[in-house]
Amino acid sequence: MRALFVSDLHLDPARPQITDLFLAFLREEAARSPALYIPGDLFEAWVGDDDDAELPARVAQALRALADGGTRIAFIRGNRDFLLGGGYATRAGFEILPDPCVIAPGGEPILLLHGDLLCVDDAAYQAVRRQVRDPDWQRALLARPLAERRAFAQAARQSSAAHQQAMTSQEIGDAAPHAVEDFFRRYGVSRMIHGHTHRPAVHDLVVDGVPRQRIVLGDWYEQGSVLRMYEDGRCELAGLILPD
């Protein structure tokens, strides 16, 4: 095994069975892998590294145990946990990578990103993304009391759900083909891995006469989803079933 990839877990106290599945995955499969990549939306919402809720503490403890056992853990901020910072990363034993970035497990350059940067046809979403990624905006939000930030996160989730329902076409919220091609050209890679769209699939395509592959990671709403990358470079998308 070269590496494992999981994304869009959206861990939430309201879905404890998914948290239990993820923690079991860390203890078992991930502990046998040299690297684990989490490109965003590990949590359903993130209100700051000072959050004293039980769930972030449990997850940090499990991730730290995995890191202490020798597995490298790398994380990219998603659209739900864009406020996650160095304090929590230190507690959990992982590094935060830029979005996007080129990684090379086993020597092959791979473009890794959360995936929302590819959804350029959703202009309203991209405008919100630019706002919430602004450092000054983030500092102002993090300066508010924790209770206010929690209320803000809840309102943002409701607004996001309403926006998704209002979109006239599912393609608007999906990765735009021209954006995918642009990212392949810009970074000069043959393989791209991302999440965000919740449409797990392996897409083989040709860009500028070169064979390319775009792998979309699945979400963890109804089951788990993992991408396994083997020593020969082969990739396998698999589901993880909830225990009875």
Image: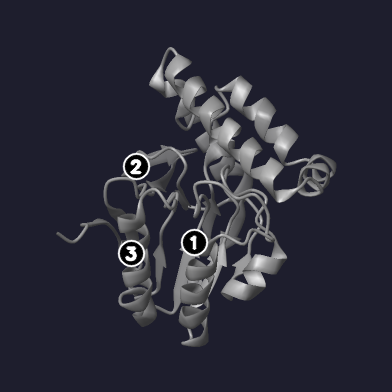
Using the image, tell me which numbered label, if any, was put on residue 20.
Answer: 3
Residue appearing at x 53%, y 34% in the figure: 157
| Residue 202, horizontal then vertical, whole percent | 32, 46
Quote the CA–CA distance across marks 2 and 3: 31 Å
- For badge 3, the amino acid type reads Asp
Say whether residue 147 is visible.
yes
Relative to 216, say whether 155 is above or below. above
Q: CA gap, disc 1 to disc 3?
A: 11 Å
Say what amino acid the circle numbered 2 marks. Answer: His
Display colour scheme: one colour
Mark 2 or 3: the one toward you: 3
Is residue 181 shown above or below 127? below
Local crowd at mark 1 within 10 Å, few (<14), some, or many (≥20)?
some
Left or right side of 7 for 121:
right
Which is more N-terminal, label 3 or label 2?
3
Name of the residue lying farthest toward the left: 244
Q: Quadrant of the N terminus?
A: bottom left
Q: Quadrant of residue 21?
A: bottom left
Instruction: Return the mark for residue 203.
Output: 2
Disc assigned to residue 55? 1
Q: Amino acid at mark 1?
A: Leu
Distance of label 1 from label 2 (alpha carbons): 34 Å
